[in-house]
Image (cartoon, rainbow, N blue to C red):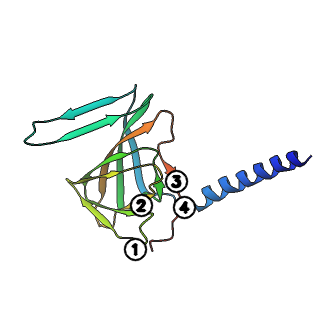
Amino acid sequence: MKSKWLWVLLVVLLGVGLYAGSVLATPPSGLTTTTLARSSFDHLNIKAHTTPANVWRARIKTHGVSDFYVIDNHLAPGGTTGWHSHPGPSLIFVVAGTVTNYMGDDQHCQPHDYAAGTGFVDEGGDHVHMLRNNGDVAAETIAVQFLPTGATRRIDAADPGNCP
């Protein structure tokens, strides 16, 4: 009888947690997202190098199948992606306007501005962030995302409370 009540309590707590997560999530506004490409790749073990004079190296290694996405995001002036994370890393190319990246774990809410022609890396995992277009012209980013196969591409998150 005790174990039955424990299961009921566990299910109720799980339901409350899921409800609170969806209620507290910060939805995007002024954002249009288009998937330009999606493909699955088997196990990757990519190594790159160059001459010792330049000393440039790269390594991408995955276990099992991965899903790769190319995402086009348009942010209207004042638009925001809302707080969110991704289960894997993203390479972000700013192709128009300027976007400001805010990080959920930054207690001082320091803005990081990226103008057209620049880029940055979103490390993914539990790294919660939000992009905002603080300018008065439209902004656009192209993101290349590396995700575990079958994973949800975007995970909405609650406002961490560190940014006005």
Of circles 1 and 3, the one toward us is 1
Q: Residues within 10 Å of mark 3 (few under 14, many from 20)?
A: many
Mark 3 near mark 4, Cβ–Cβ under 8 Å? no
Query: Quick one: SS at disc 1?
Result: loop
**Which mark is on residue 156?**
3
Q: Residues within 10 Å of mark 4 (few under 14, many from 20)?
A: some
Q: Amino acid at mark 2?
A: Thr
Q: Which label's residue is closer to the chain start, 4 or 1? A: 1
Query: CA separation, marks 3 and 4?
Result: 7 Å
Q: Amino acid at mark 4?
A: Ala
Q: Nearer the viewer, residue 110 or 3?
A: 3
Q: Quadrant of residue 100?
A: bottom left
Compared to 41, does 29 lie above or below? below
Q: Which label's residue is closer to the chain start, 2 or 1? A: 2
Of circles 4 and 1, the one toward us is 1
Q: Amino acid at mark 1?
A: His
